[in-house]
Amino acid sequence: MQRALRLMEAVASHSSGAPAKQLAREARLPLATTYHLLRTLAHEGYATRLPDGFWVLGERVESLHGRSRTQQLLARLRPALVALRDELGAAAYFGMHVDDEIRLIDIADGPRAPRVDLWVGFEDAAHATAMGKCVLSQFDDERRRDYLSRHPLVDLTPHTITEPGRLMRSLSSSTGLLLDREEYALGTGCAAVPVTDATGSVRGALAVSCRPGKLPKIERAASQMRATAERIQRTLTLHS
């Protein structure tokens, strides 16, 4: 494994590729070993031999790089979510607006702060979740209507808002703290605050879930949620 990693580092150091003999010298490997490793890496998609005989990194490396960036982001976000979970005694969630969808990115929960049962994906239930409504509240009317035209207002519980006009009015009158009063799942309430970038543009939302009777306490802790949202905003700014 050490030899293969050294060889991949050598390949990566040449933006236009390099021949096997040069890579063998730079990785301090016998030429026969280099050829064997290159063939194995090529078979797995981590290296590619060009028509001129030069070697470059394969497509699977880019896939790993993308996942690595996501994992690095989660590693930076998780402490903020865990701290908020412990402060409020409620599961904490972070979601982002990505590719015109509202996606759940990470959750910090635990035995004393269980997560809500995600029986319907957040992408299909933005109208019923505090997180989804929080992101939608940051859109202008045109973007909201476009989003809702692609996502039917499915009736998830007796409390779900399924009338477009009523939902639009509730989003327009938002004060920055959005609530879900058993609209996504019976027995669960949620609260969310926005997370923006340095310019104030929408990035996502920070939310916590709890028993409905605990929502008033969570509402009174809105300042703590906003402080965590600002911490996440700084993390996203530094990571971008």
Image (cartoon, helix red, strand yellow):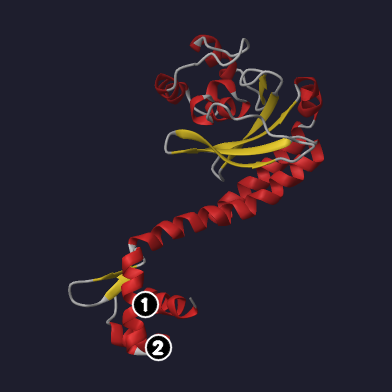
Number of residue marks? 2
Q: Secondary structure at mark 2?
A: loop
Question: Does residue 38 appear left or right of residue 185 in this picture?
Answer: left
Question: Label 1 is placed on what type of residue?
Answer: Leu
Question: Does residue 186 appear left or right of residue 2 in this picture?
Answer: right
Q: Secondary structure at mark 1?
A: helix
Q: Report crowding for label 2: few under 14, some 14 to 19, many 20 or more residues within 10 A (C-alpha).
A: some
Evaluate whether residue 234 shows in this view.
yes
Q: Nearer the viewer, residue 222 or 123?
A: 123
The spot of residue 235 in percent (x, y) is 61, 52
Q: What residue is shown with label 2?
A: 29
* Precedes in sequence: disc 1 or disc 2: 2
The spot of residue 118 in percent (x, y) is 59, 30
Residue at figure coordinates x 56%, y 28% from the top left:
132
- State whether residue 45 is above or below residue 152: below
- State whether residue 83 is above or below residue 1: above
How many angstroms separate mark 1 from mark 2 (CA)? Answer: 10 Å
- Image disc number at residue 37: 1
Residue at figure coordinates x 77%, y 39% from the top left:
111
Q: Are marks 1 and 2 in contact (CB under 8 Å)?
A: yes
- State whether residue 104 is above or below residue 65: above
The spot of residue 110 in percent (x, y) is 74, 41
Displayed quadrant of residue 200 = top right
Question: Does residue 61 appear left or right of residue 163 in this picture?
Answer: left
The spot of residue 16 in percent (x, y) is 28, 74
